[in-house]
Image (cartoon, rainbow, N blue to C red):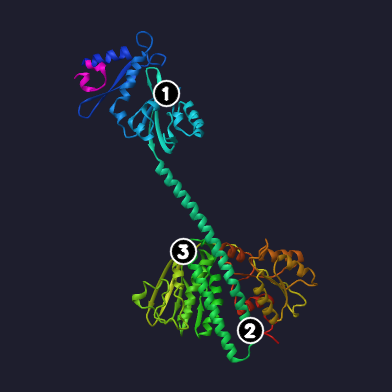
Amino acid sequence: MSAAALLADAGALLALEMPFGRLESEARKSCGIAFRHHSMADGGLVCLCDPVPSAAGQAPSPPGGSVTQGLVHGLLAQVTDSFAFTRNPLPLWIFDPDTLAFVAVNDAAVSRYGYPRERFLGMRISDIRPPEDAPRLLEMLADRSVPGESGQWRHLLADGTVIDVLVTSVWFTLGRRTLCMAAVQDITDHCRLEESLLEARIEAERSNRARSRFFAVANHDLRQPLAALSLFVGALENRLKDPTSRDILRAMNTALATIKNLVDAHLDIARIDAGTLRVEPVGHSVNGLLTRMALEFAGPARQKGLTLHVAPCSAVIRSDRDLLERILRNLLSNAVRYTSSGRILLGCRRQGGRLRIEVWDTGPGIPADQLDIIFEEFYRGNTPSTSESAGFGLGLSIVDRLSRLLDHSLSVRSREGKGSVFAITVPMEGEAEVRAEPVHAPARPDDLGRPRVLVIEDDVIVLQALELLLDQWGCDVTAASGYDEAVEGVSGQADPPDLVIADFRLSGPASGIVAIRQIAKMLDVDLPGLIITGDTDPRCLKEARLSGYPLLHKPVSALALRAAVASLLGRDRLRDGVE
């Protein structure tokens, strides 16, 4: 087989059509080139050529002591004139790393970069880069262990446009001249997409922070006037003796509770859908949660003539305390609202490593064909919208969203006319979260006297309502709109207060918790405190609960406030109402 047949267009040297063995011998002598033979699967032969190493590790010099310049140009021409180089769809070029000058460029490079071939060959590779990228290029080329200019770069087109490129390059030697061949891939669109995604992510995070601030402010500010109104209604209850007036007041109280529930529901759904609710699972005893639910719903159940039974449980669960409490509150609220007679049961069942918390009722039940839609917004079943027991159809929607947010399974089974069972399943764990011990009121010789209460609240209307109610209950009230005013108020008194009631979020740098602790430290007494808040931020609620002080959520009813104050001061120290 002749060499010309094997290497069809390899150059004029092969036009002799000499046998391959003779060609190899001549190439070794004249060019310092050796051939490596590779057999192909079909029996054919592929030959690759390398410089023949000398004793010093260099290619041997041909007769005459050096490779002629014409021969180097001839070999370079064979590379640059090949179809693989000229017609390659990727921009390709060869440059001299010592001078950075372009030695050859292919058609794709001329077309993509917009420089005429003659101008291209008169430029250096540093000329197609922004000036600020040149130092990095020179530093890379100085390190010959790195293959040329490989990596991600920015290149300048002839019209001044800057594009992002990925360069793959390799060193090679022709005779004794070292050159570098580079292939360029335009990744501008990819980089722009990455930048757009990064900008979109930053904007989304900024929007989420803005939404979080909005919902935090909305939760707090909307609850302030509702809290004041609820307390004023409570203050009026003991002043009105006329049955008609008391009926009107009762209707006002119902309307107020309706507004509160509606605000809570809409804000909860908005925060869940906006992704601004933070989940903070902790280990805690489920019994504390059950006890709070029993205290909260015993009154409403009793008013409807229902029996509420809460079975204690010693299990320790892992869940977000506040969000799980919100789920159970909605389930129990629905049970009380829709059950006209019978009983409601809140209890737990252990299932391996999980605990199933169940709410049973003897209400009207849910038709089988509606079980799939009860968690949709505004579902009210068959209850007329004008009925007193009708809600907004948002409670179960919130329950469904929160259970998915917490990754707790939610289930329901029901028999029409018999009642329903809603269950939320949570993981159990071994130890509960360590919580601070509550601060108890110290025993004092004047315990039978008029109790002294310090109230710190930066909302003037809420402060007035608290002052009015506490005064009706026989308390000597010192009202302050902030920490500094509170310190000034108690400093002039002969005896320290028996109780401090403080809003969690005050206008100054000190929170209500800090204010109570600092005042107790200043007076050197064990000072009991009560925190009232309209904040729903889980971090704030966690801080409030871990403080050891009882916590009431705005808008707080007069009944709940009296119960909390009585538990801290003693029930016998509060009057029933106005004299």
The numbered mark, 3 or 1, whose residue comes first in the sequence reads 1
The answer to whether mark 1 and mark 2 are in CB contact below 8 A is no
Which amino acid does the dot numbered 2 rest on? Leu
User: What crowding class fits label 3: few (fewer than 14 Cα within 10 Å), some (14-19), or many (20 or more)?
Assistant: few
Residue 236's label in the rendered image is 2
Q: Magenta stretch: residue 11 in it?
A: yes
Q: Magenta stretch: residue 98 in it?
A: no
User: What crowding class fits label 2: few (fewer than 14 Cα within 10 Å), some (14-19), or many (20 or more)?
Assistant: some
Question: 306 and 68: which one is in front?
Answer: 68
Which amino acid does the dot numbered 1 rest on? Asp
Q: Residue 109 at what x, y percent from top left?
A: 36, 32
Q: Is residue 208 above or below residue 364?
A: above
Which amino acid does the dot numbered 3 rest on? Asp
**Relative horizontal placement of residue 424, taking residue 499 as reference (left or right):** left
Mark 3 and mark 1: span between their CA atoms?
A: 60 Å
The quadrant of the picture occupied by the C terminus is bottom right
Q: Tag 1, which secondary structure?
A: loop
User: What crowding class fits label 1: few (fewer than 14 Cα within 10 Å), some (14-19), or many (20 or more)?
Assistant: some
For disc 3, the marked residue is: 273
Question: 571 and 276: which one is in front?
Answer: 276
User: Which segment is the magenta one?
Assistant: 1-15
Q: Tag 3, which secondary structure?
A: helix
Q: Tag 2, which secondary structure?
A: helix
Mark 3 vs mark 1: in front = 1
The quadrant of the picture occupied by the N terminus is top left
The numbered mark, 1 or 2, whose residue comes first in the sequence reads 1
Residue situated furthest left in the rendering: 1
**Relative horizontal placement of residue 245, taking residue 205 as reference (left or right):** right
Residue 96's label in the rendered image is 1
Mark 3 and mark 2: span between their CA atoms?
A: 39 Å
